[in-house]
Amino acid sequence: MPSAKELGLMRKHRVLCQLRFQRIVLLLIVTGFLSATTRASQSAVGNSDTEEAMLRRAEVAANRIVRRFHETLDFGGIFADEFITEPNLRTRALSFGNPDLLTHFDAATRERMYVSTMTFMHLFESYVLIQNVNKTPPEVQNLDPKPEFLVSSDTKPPRDLAEANQAIAEVEKVSALYRKYLTQVVFDGPIYRENLRRQRKSEKDNFVNIPRIVQGNEKFSIPKSVPVYVVRPECFDYYFIREDGVMKLFYVDVLPDFKLIF
């Protein structure tokens, strides 16, 4: 059993990882890869047997996505197979609910930006979960020069295709460094399981309402008559909606319990 000192160091490391994670997410928001709009307020609804069954289906879909990411370390195939296809919601989802974000790019470019961002964020989350040593991989820490999105809080969104391609290339370069540490073995290991157990305990201790069903989503223009299923397979909240009877992902909330305070 870890000593009190060791437990204290592990808690301190976890807090530092979370702070580093939040900083990178906020920097990505500034670059235009994520939307800085406030999350819409959501109303909880009562769960009938049918609703509970649908929520379980959403959990199954989320766990399938996580397993696939552990195997591929890439969000591209997940996006192709698990993402919403209805045109209006898909367009809004690619902009994280902000209809004015990156409208000067075509759908293919916005999809590439979305996939590269989601890949990086899942790699970042996975690295935090599989070890208790570093905030970031040493190769990322020692990059010289570092990509702008890692070090600057005042970068501008890409203005044209050349800048978008450069931003994607920088994110993918960092992602490649994370992948070196994320073999299937580590996801089957005791550190990953223990970190995930602590995550679940923290959610329980803080009365986090997950999984849950909400009615609609204002930010994504989903009417209140439509149930939205929110589940958390690891550290991110996955938002699902039924499309032709199948659970489809339309939003990944990478900071589900983080409140911005200004």
Image (tube, rainbow, N blue to C red):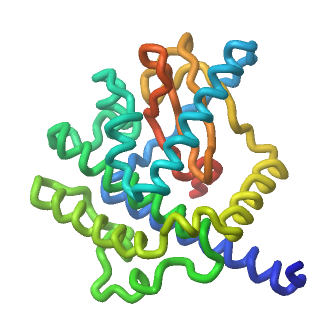
Q: Between 71 and 17, which is closer to the camera in this rendering?
A: 71
State the residue at coordinates (37%, 55%).
74
Q: Is residue 233 left or right of residue 105?
A: right
Where residue 75 sits: x, y (%)?
Answer: 38, 50
Residue 159, position in %: x, y?
15, 54
Q: Is residue 180 left or right of residue 163?
A: right
191 to 6, vertically: above or below: above
State the residue at coordinates (62%, 37%).
231
Residue 40's place in the image compared with 183, above or below, is: above
Location of the N terminus (image quadrant): bottom right
Q: Could you say which quadrant of the image residue 62 lies in?
A: top right
**Nearer-the-camera pick, 256 or 58:** 58
Q: Residue at x 81, y 84 (%)?
A: 6
Is 118 or 65 nearer to us in this picture? 65
Q: Is residue 205 above or below residue 214?
A: below
Q: Position of residue 48 (x, y in %)?
A: 74, 13
Q: Compared with residue 200, is residue 228 higher up or lower down, i.e. above or below?
A: above
Image check: 20 left or right of 47?
left
Image quarter in which the C terminus is found: bottom right
- Count numbered badges in the picture: 0
Give coordinates of residue 158: x percent, y percent. Answer: 20, 57
Residue 58 falls left or right of residue 143: right
Dividing the picture into quadrants, the one containing residue 80 is top left
Which residue is painted at 39% across and 40% down in the image? 96
